[in-house]
Image (tube, grey):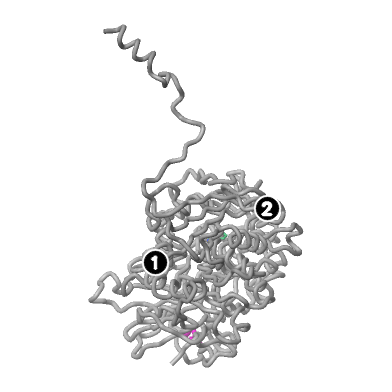
Amino acid sequence: TASTVLASAARAQTAPMAPDVPASFEMRMPAADYVRREVMIPMRDGVRLHTVLLIPKAAQHAPMVLSRTPYSANGRSRRNDSPSLLATGGQGDEVLLGAGYIRVYQDVRGKYGSEGDYVMTRPLRGPLNNSRSDHATDAWDTIDWLVKNVPESNGKVGMIGSSYEGYTVLMALIDPHPALKVAVPMSPMVDGWRGDDWFHNGVFRMTNIAYIAHQTTAHGSGLPLPTGVYDDYEGVLRAGSTADYARQFGLDKLNFTRKLFEHPAYDSYWQQQAVDKLLAQRPLKVPTMTVVGYWDQEDIYGAYAVYAALEAKDTDNRHNFLVVGPWRHSGVNYDGSSLGVFKFPGDTALEFRRDVMQPFLDQYLKDGAPVADTPPVLFFQSGANRWQRLQRWPLACEQGCAAPLRALYLQDGYKLGFSAPVGEAAYDEYVSDPAKPVPFVPRPVRMNDAAVWRPWLVSDQRGYSDRPDVLTYVTAPLTAPLRIAGAAQVQLHAATTGTDADWVVKLIDVYPDEVPSQPELGGYQLGVAMDIFRGRYRHSLEQPAPIVANAIEQYRFALPNANHVFLPGHRIMVQIQSSWFPLYERNPQTYVPNIFYAKPADYQKASMRVYHGGASASAIELPVVE
Ligand code: PG9
């Protein structure tokens, strides 16, 4: 009856209108095989950094592996996902979580749960940072706290991490805490101007505008760009300059955007932050295995630069290691059995993590672990599609290697060959029109679409080879394999009717017309090493200078490292163009002091001439090895 219902409601202890969301709630985990500890670790300046520890239940004398991230320690440790430790970290952490390690993730200062100010890739204390703290001291203070406050540990710490997290690993090596026993920086951001995230050889990468918005519009996860267009080619072109593009979203007001726009050239702001240069000035104390993807679309430069900087200090050849797998950016932590249409012999990334990285970490971190059989350099050889254990890198270079570079010349009739062309300074030409830049991937261009962005460096270059604004040179089909192992040097003699220009040079492996084992590779044009160079920096990266219109000038720059075999029946191709849009901002082709602020009238068509004869020969100098 109605009166019994009312009586039972009155007896109940929870009022019908009691609010249903409590002030806080801690989910209990049924029978978890690990303990999750969240702590605020104090730094020397009083700022506390939010740190998550995943500790296996049975842990005793367990080593710790630390990652310092701007991308959320809670996210990286998949808060509350599972009572199973193995299912809690990312794919890349599986081998560590299954091997008794205590995994530690920390938010860098100013991001997510950590206190303090966020400064993008915070410069080291010194000319650019007059505070008491940087990533070197924060890593030191964190490790010091960990070894004193985690009773389940054996007091040994390793650091790993990819990209920004790879950069924080390197910064910990500047003045390493004695308990830091080993480091594995992966796809690290090292020099933002030379060839990592922000610029390549001075040409700004437009993908960063969305990145900066995401990273610096909030301490937590920032905002996406409301571009209002499906095709970024259209959206970026319509805006005008990079500053115009940023301004339409109000992003020109952000401090990091300002810093970028105030430093278009390789001035002291960039030079003093280049991590390879910083590490070169210090002793190498911690065994370091630097890892990078062969086709790393974000940080293809830094890993090799760090390896080279540390190699001079590695007197016993036991402190400096390099690993290059057939991966995209950070691909080392995911499935490595394919990239784009290319298939590899098994999961190369898991193979590395399980058979190379884990034994390497064990050696330095686990009490009594055996010495790992780690080669100085482990490099996946593309073309031959296999791993190689090498003693050093590179195998051929301009100076100081076992083999020199060998010039592959541009020749008449759009040919390429190892013999220098004789006779007149012949040229080929094209018109570069900033109103119709060459796309870097087919339109519509969705820069945020991971399926396009991640494998783009192995995408088929065939669609560009016959454009009127791209010059294409190619060899005859090879009769014997040609192997390269190092960084090719571009030596270009070129003229333009403009007063500034960008030069994109692509070294390409052209597959045979038919590939029976994988038909879609028939005639495929695979980028083996491709990059862009901003002409104003041809004499000095620090001091730009206008190009003299119509004069033959020399442009010399390195392509990314490659370890590749051009197989018999394949052809070698070189493509040359003057834009790569919208990944790379356009060059207005009229010299202006700061291209970030170019005005619409500065963007002008220009005729580009690439010379290939006599004293004006152009070549790609290849690191050929027998
Ligand atoms: N490539 C990213 C990045 C690192 C450092 C600065 C800016 C961007 C990353 O994947 O973390």
What residue sits 34% from the left and 68% below the top? Answer: 338
* Residue that mark 1 sits on: 459
Seen from the viewer's position, the closer of residues 536 and 30 is 30
Q: Can residue 197 be seen in this view?
A: yes
Seen from the viewer's position, the closer of residues 532 and 463 is 532
Is 455 located above or below residue 326 in the figure?
above
What separation in Å lies between label 2 and label 1 (alpha carbons)?
A: 33 Å
Residue 60 marker: none
What residue sits 46% from the left and 40% below the top? Answer: 26
Seen from the viewer's position, the closer of residues 373 and 492 is 373
Residue type at tag 2: Arg
Residue 424: in magenta span: no
What residue sits 62% from the left and 84% below the top? Answer: 312
- Helix, strand or loop status at disc 1: loop
Q: Is residue 586 visible?
A: no
**Among the two numbered marks 2 and 1 on one chain, the one whose residue lies closer to the N terminus:** 2
Crowding near pointer 2: few (<14 within 10 Å), some, many (20+)? few
The residues colored magenta run 407-411
Is 228 located above or below residue 260 in the figure?
above
- In the drawing, does residue 566 fall left or right of residue 253? left
Crowding near pointer 1: few (<14 within 10 Å), some, many (20+)? many
Q: Where is residue 360 in the image (x, y as percent from the top left)?
A: 47, 75
Residue 258 marker: 2
For discs 2 and 1, the disc positioned in front in the rendered view: 2
Is 618 located above or below residue 165 in the figure?
below
> Quarter for ligand 1?
bottom right
